[in-house]
Amino acid sequence: MSADTALAVEGLLVSYGGVPAVRDVSFDVAAGEIVGLIGPNGAGKSTTLHAIVGLVRAQRGEVTLDGRSLRGRSPEAVARAGVALVPEGRRLFAELTVEENLQLGLAARRENGSVRDALAEVFALFPILEDFRKRSAGALSGGQQQQLAIARALVAKPTVLLLDEPSLGLAPTIVDLVFSTLAEIRERGLAILLVEQRAQRTVALADRTHVLANGELRLQLTPQDAGDTDKMIAAYLA
Amino acid sequence: MNTLVASGLTDFLHDAVEPQVQADAIGLGAVFALMAVGIGLVFGVLRLINFAYGQLIMAGGFALAYASERGWPVLAAIALCVAVVVGLSLAMERIVFRPLRGQSPASMLVATFAVAFLLQSIALIWFGPLGKNAASLVELNQPMSIGSVEVRKIAVVSLVTAAVALALLLLLLNRTSIGLHMRAAALDFPTARLVGVRANAVSAVAVVLAGLLAAIVAVLLTVQFPTVTPTFALNETIIVLAGVVVGGMNRLLPATLGGFAIGYVSGILGGALPTNQSQYLSTFLFLLVIVVLLLRPEGLFTRGGHAVERV
């Protein structure tokens, strides 16, 4: 664990009714880096994220943010501590407007600034959201909704950003946009944990990528491995 | 036989359109609408039907009776009523609702039933079955003239109070931060928590608001029914629950309209049914409820089908 480790997960064990979904998972994410977490369906990727934010209880293991433990905290306490999750399927409030969704994101912010400035920052990242600010979130396209989901997470100025399969169901051009935005956010010093099924693109973007299969971490890949599909297939079949 | 039914119907309609009956029915509708909002708010945010809501109103009624017996000024009596009801609501939230958060609907149902019976039993022990008198605002039961028509003051007061309360509630829900948090929690509680909405805060605010409404209802009901017994507001709560289901459980506006509608119909039936038939009021009312639910199970005032768990 280096000095600027933002998020550290150690020995995480999460079981559902006695069946372990995540076994002895350990990794960390530093400020200004993207760590990828890939794996097949049911590998335990979402469970890992849910355990970090307190949506599910981990039976064993430790999750720390800047050295402080997050174990046992409620989801809203974790959010207010500076960990933001962009959930699988976006989970936007479809009946509320774009602006209201963003205002909700402000619930977790730690500094008191003007709402206008906070919104202005995310509008700069995602200009399309400003155009649609008064529209209901449900009226947006899939790609726009994904942008809104990320913006909602960012508006609270978190230290750590977790994303659960943001490219799911999106057209390739939108995936490009999402991934390039993540690269931009990385430049701003955020610690980003990216859970994805699109293995190749994730490995290419992230500084390091862990492969999770059957609840266990199998392999660590770097961008150099992005072209090396054999190694990756071996990791999946292992 | 036909002429008997026809004349019975004509008499009923004749009585039903009388201004006094209409005004009373609207007043009752307004009171039931407030109860519906109280129940709907807690259901929306906590996903919990508070079967003990009637007992909150009863507690408020007893507080008013306590104050009335000691000759307290009206405002002090109302203040005591609000304090007792809100205090009791918060206690319920902390002791019963919060530990049950996320449990099965069946558990929550049984728990609120238990609380309802508990409060009723306590009231029975403390105040006896004959109850107490809450007579502070009885002059509101007197008639007043609107133009050429005489209606009871309480009908007008009920309507105005309900309108103001609902307008304030709408302002709170739509224009404040906590209101936004509550609306989000009602739409998707886990995701709301993920973005930082405090579960305990929205829970407490919903319960306090419902409690405030219950206190208002207690004041309005004691005007027409000054004797507060342990079963005070019990019948009304059951009727309002039916109204909320008929109106549409899942959203606040349909639930409120449902409460108003069933209150209004109840008032018309109460005012227009001949006295020897008045014991059938509940029968007629619930027959109507069954018919409406058979024809439109998703609720009368909902748009499109929202699948709701009916318990």
Image (cartoon, grey):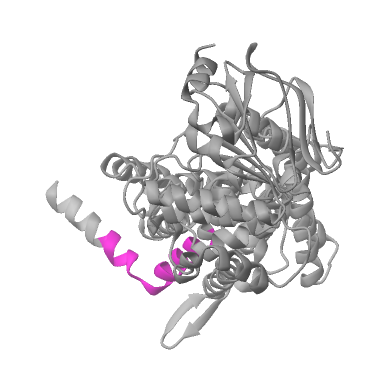
Q: Position of residue B85 (x, y in %)?
A: 74, 53
Residue that sits furthest to the left in the current view: B2
Q: Main secondary structure of the magenta part?
A: helix
Q: Between residues A6 and A101, which one lies in front from this camera angle?
A: A6
- The magenta stretch is B11-31
Q: Residue at x 81, y 72 (%)?
A: B73
Image coords of residue A216 (percent x, y): 64, 17
Residue A93: % across, % down: 50, 52
Residue B232 in magenta stretch:
no
Q: Nearer the viewer, residue A226 or A118?
A: A226
Q: Is residue B287 left or right of residue B94?
A: left
Q: Is residue A200 above or below residue B161?
A: above
Is residue B30 within the magenta segment?
yes
Q: Image point 47% across, 53% down: which residue?
A: A177
Residue B134: quarter of image = bottom right
Q: Is residue B259 above or below residue A216?
A: below
Does the rendering let one see residue B228? no
Observer-nearest residue: A208 or B49?
A208
Residue at image coords 56%, 27%: B106
Relative to A19, residue A182 above or below: below
Left or right of A64? Residue B17 is left
Q: Position of residue B284 (x, y in %)?
A: 35, 45
Image-based side of A4 in relation to A121, left or right: right
Instruction: Give the farthest residue toward the bottom.
Output: B147
| Image height of B178 relative to A85, above or below | below
Res B190 seen here: yes
**Lateral position of residue B31 relative to residue B205, left or right:** left
